[in-house]
Amino acid sequence: MRIAAFMLFLAATIWASATLAREEGLDLPDTVPMPEQRPSEAPRRPGDARPRFPVLLLIPKEDADAAAKLCKAVLDRDKMTAEIAGPALWDNGCGAVGQITISAIKLKDGKQIALRPAALIRCETAEAVADWVREELVPATEAYSGLARIDVAASYHCRPRNNIRGALMSEHGRANALDIRAIVMNDGRRFGVDLRETPIQLLSDLRRSTCERFTTVLGPGSDGFHEDHFHLDLAQRRGGYRLCQWNLPVPPEPARNPQRVADPSTKQQQSP
């Protein structure tokens, strides 16, 4: 009875309101308007873990001009085939001001070492990679017919470290890192940290030279995420701290000399 009485009262109230509106000439909407959606930049409620789209930040003109000047100086040194990439920064820490897309590294003799696919990285990082290739990687591969190509596993990628949700921003997200999957020789051979045919001496040379030039080097044995490639970056840390974690494979045991192996089927003659 109470529910029926309430519904009757509600219907009478709506009818009275509509009649009053018609008498006063009010123009009422056909539907009740919905409230505006909550803006993405509004503060979050505690415990709200829903993903939020990052917001593009405004880059000060003086910062953009300084980065453009630095990149122009890098490209003028003619160490690489590259194109300028527009600056972009987001409020989640991703992006960079002063970045280029490298498709090849130029050697002093005019030959070009292709990067496949092309890598998007900051200009300072790009020049460090080019110098390492020209001065260290090319000489180290001369004994194996010479370097023809670098297979890139990753360059710029807006993500946390090792793609782990909640982790700190990766240097890849700042266009400050390069992952190398393999290097290809002129005779077609392909060498990499997980390819058994790769000479251990070559891997040793790569580890030594990269750890001398970059502030972070990660390879097999570092964290479980770099078993099939090696990572280079120029992360800036307090006190100039550097990180080099790359375990080389254990060399195989040398073959035993058959001339020094006694035949167990024959008995040694005893001296008189």
Image (spheres, rainbow, N blue to C red):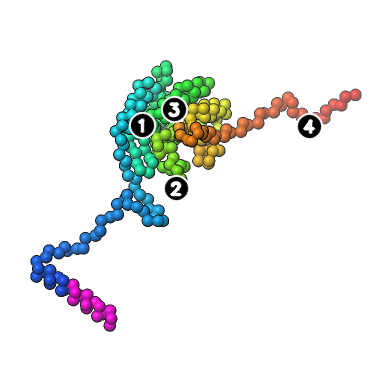
Q: Which mark, by number, is residue 246? A: none
- Amino acid at dot 4: Ser
Residue at the limit of the structure toward the right, as seen here: 272
| Magenta extent | 1-14
- Amino acid at dot 2: Gly
User: From the viewer's perspective, is residue 266 above or below residue 41?
Assistant: above
Residue 163: x and y, percent?
A: 45, 44
**CB contact under 8 Å: marks 4 and 1:** no
Q: Secondary structure at mark 1?
A: strand
Give the spatial CA distance, label 3 vs label 2.
29 Å
* Residue 24, quarter of picture: bottom left
User: From the viewer's perspective, is residue 119 above or below residue 54?
Assistant: above
Q: In the image, what residue occupies the spot 49% across and 27% down?
A: 213
Q: Secondary structure at mark 4?
A: loop
Q: Earlier along the polypeptide chain: callout 3 or callout 1?
A: 1
Residue 97: x and y, percent?
A: 35, 34
Give the spatial CA distance, label 2 vs label 1.
26 Å
| Residue under pointer 4 | 265
